[in-house]
Image (cartoon, rainbow, N blue to C red):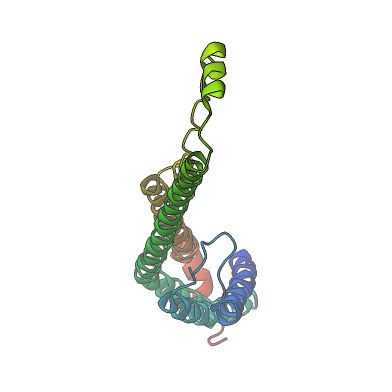
Amino acid sequence: MVIGSIAIAFGAIGAMLSLWGLASSTFLSSLSSPGMPPGVTMPPELTTFTVVDSLLGLALAAMLVTGGIATVRRRAGGVKLLRSYAIIRLVLVIPLTVTQGLLTARMMDQMAAALEKAEADADAEADTGAAQAGDAAATADAGTAPATATDASATDATDTPAPAPAPKPAASGNAGPPVAAVKQVMMATAVGGTACAGLLAAVWPTVLLVLLANGRRKDEVSSWPRGL
């Protein structure tokens, strides 16, 4: 059956994705992802969730491949296994999606806090630099020798205007977008991405159950040998 071939293909893809998730959570859990602010790492709870989700994905992929092979061989047990896979997958979609969303939101909060700290440090550094520049200018003015009477008369005669003071440099933290806006974008992206992933995960099991519930197909499967 065509359903069995599609199940084998989807099962193989799911197994590869699960293996990649398991490998990345194992070897990269202690490293900061590219683009993350310094000091921000993957939360331990998210790493544990990734491992559990990957192991569940491997088990479901094995069910999908085994059921697909048996269905291609026209064994009734293969259809039963595919139906069991679809039901288990749909039952797990909501709790897995909600858990992933909560853990991702926690990581976004950590990143936003790191961005706020970096912005505050940049403002403080800019203010300190401006204060030091002002102190240096005041020290230089105080150390200048007083002009003589002749020099004063010459200066009054030429009436040269005094140079304007240097403007205070702006704080570097004000150059970028507000941290609150960045946090809102990060949270919206995380929540939207997690929700879309959950919906996509529910599409194939739903389609599979609908296809297997077809009356004519059920009659055909009833005539197949039992088992796998």
On the image, which quarter does residue 69 sit in? bottom right
- The answer to whether one can see residue 71 in this image is no
Residue visible at 44% across and 79% down in the picture: 44
Quarter where residue 199 is shown: bottom left
Depicted 78 relative to depicted 110: above or below = below
Near-viewer residue (152 or 190): 152
* Residue at screen point 49% across, 76% down: 50
Q: State left or right for residue 105 relative to residue 35.
A: left
Q: Which residue is drawn at 46% across and 74% down?
A: 83
Report if residue 96 is visible in the image: yes
Position of residue 208 relative to residue 68, above or below, is: above
Q: Nearer the viewer, residue 181 or 103?
A: 181
| Residue 116 at x, y percent in the picture | 40, 55
Relative to residue 61, is residue 174 drawn left or right?
left
Q: Position of residue 203 (x, y in %)?
A: 47, 59
Residue shown at 50%/75% (left/top)? 82
Task: State the image coordinates of residue 209 (x, y, percent, origin top left).
Answer: 44, 65
Does residue 162 lie above or below 146 as drawn? Answer: above
In this orientation, which residue lies closer to the viewer: 216 or 140? 140
Residue found at the far front of this picture: 149
Residue 57 location, x and y as percent?
52, 77
Quarter assignment of residue 73: bottom right
